[in-house]
Amino acid sequence: MARWRRTIRRLRRRSLVERSRRTRQVVLLATATGALTGLAVAAFERVTAEVLRAVLSGPLALQVAAPGLGLVLALVVLGVGPGRTPPSTSDEYIRSFHDAAAPMPLRPVPRRLMAAVATLGAGGPLGYEGPSLYMGAAIGSALQRRTKGLFGPDEGKVLLVAGAAAGVAAIFKAPVTGLVFALEVPYQDDLARRMLLPAGISAAASYLVFAAIAGTEPLLAVAGQPPFNLVDLGGAAATGLLCGLLARLFIAVIRRAKKLRVQVRPAWRLVGAGAVLAGTVGLGHAAASADLALGPGYSALTWAMKPENGVAVIAALGTLRVVGTAAVVAGGGVGGLFIPLVVQGALIGRAMGGVFETSTTTLFPVLGMAAFLGAGYRVPLAAVVFVAEFTGRPGFVVPGLIAAIVAQLVMGRSSISPYQAAGRVGHLERRLRLPLSAALDTESRTAPPDATVEELFWQHFVGGRQYSAAVVDGGRFCGLVCAEDLTSIDRSDWATTPVEKVLRADVPVAAPDTALGDAVRAMEAAGLDRLAVCDDGRFVGVITAAGLVQLDELLERAEGSS
């Protein structure tokens, strides 16, 4: 018995030594991830800023046309049609985090980054943080693939998170913000666990490398030290309430823009987005004789802080930037939404500061940043930490926390990212977060709009044993026809009535990267057994209730045999 005890103790010590050695190796890999990300973000920021500087120094005609031309270049780089690369960046990180079965795809990374340079360098009103986070996550994922033997079964996304933290830490020169944002953004009411140490050291390494190249100057100078008084604290709560309400509106606008990006053909989409962007740039110049509607928005914040600018003109500027951001998203541009949220919050706070007549001119803009960012991405901790690092003054933290929490209470379940989860979940919920490609039926029978109801009935409903059929004209999805719709046509007229007379054109349509859970909810709400999937306005296949059942059975067998 004593010999067995000695053997067990020896094996336990060996296990602890091996675990400690592996932890040190993971920390070293996280440090390397951070350093590489800092270099990559510095290069991306330098190139993009140089392109943007050339646009801003050019004539007004160039500034008006540049954002639309940037969208055209982004579309060319990302490609057109079913094989195109979607423009998502931060959403790609969140989706990859929750897809435990597969690492982040690396092939689209160069395309997305080139498209981001085209979008942001041409003056598109999005932020640099989305591509920076995406770049860091891709670097971490690539390193982890090459060293996967060092990671346990529950550590498949460690360097992915570390790289994301490094990307945000570098571009904002805020290492703690990068750490907290990367851990907080995958969930609405939870945090990523077992990744704190690697993500922290990666964010620190990235910040040091980026600061050594780009300097440590803050993105926006903030002055003053707010006092703790009831007026300012009450104003913080009121700012949080207003930011929460307007953040819900902002999210609704962005989600609608994302739907248009999928449903509208590229040519029409680019023409519309380019015209809207040209209008916002022109109106910005007319209102302030400055390029306030272009770029990420730091110049707009500096301009809004001036006391001589009234509430009405600040509200107009905020509206122009919301419209411009939505136009870039609908047009397929690549960039982040972190900074647009921050800018909108600062403008709202600046207007609220005029109402409360606070002695510290920067207090309410900073409160707006915390509230609007925290509400939009559902990251109250990251928002408050961002305020602390952004200002370097602890007096802003408590009012910022109040504003962020009030804004969270207003938001409900709304979020800027459709891939966030409420918290850690089980097998069923993970399946529902799979992309539609897991159950997409690309061979499903479709009917042309000039086919007769008679042909549809015999070939699709009887011959294909379908309850409904998609109507497609030259690759363009027209709508669905359900079996019950045929009852509105007299049986004697079936042979002469075209299908387009009975189709439902207002049915929901999904994109290829839509989650299965969202597709199921859309089908249930519309009372359909199938959902059309379109990419850039072109029909690529359908999701059917039968296909979802079959997928569930396959996953059950796979999990049972693993």
Image (tube, rainbow, N blue to C red):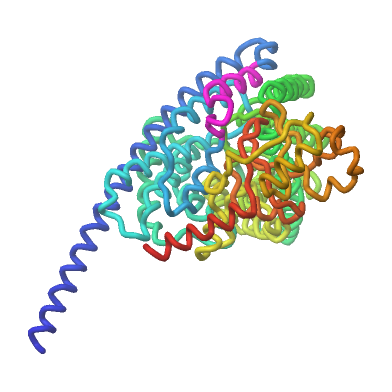
Q: Position of residue 206 (x, y in %)?
A: 38, 41
Count of labels in the image: 0
Q: Position of residue 562 (x, y in %)?
A: 37, 62
In the depicted view, which residue is nearer to us: 560 or 109?
560
Q: Is residue 63 magenta?
A: no
Q: Is residue 72 magenta?
A: yes
- Say which residue appears at 57% left-offset and 37% top-offset: 336
In the depicted view, which residue is nearer to us: 557 or 197?
557
Q: Does residue 560 appear to the left or right of 373 in the view shown?
A: left
In the depicted view, which residue is nearer to us: 381 or 260?
260
Q: Is residue 363 among what the camera can see?
A: no
- Say which residue appears at 18% left-offset and 73% top-offset: 12
**Residues drawn in magenta:** 66-87
The image quarter in which residue 123 lies:
top right
Q: Does residue 486 appear to the left or right of 415 in the view shown?
A: right
Q: Does residue 487 appear to the left or right of 135 in the view shown?
A: right
Q: What residue occupies the far left of the structure in this picture?
A: 3
- Say which residue appears at 15% left-offset and 78% top-offset: 9
Q: Position of residue 132 (x, y in %)?
A: 47, 36
Q: Position of residue 401 (x, y in %)?
A: 62, 58
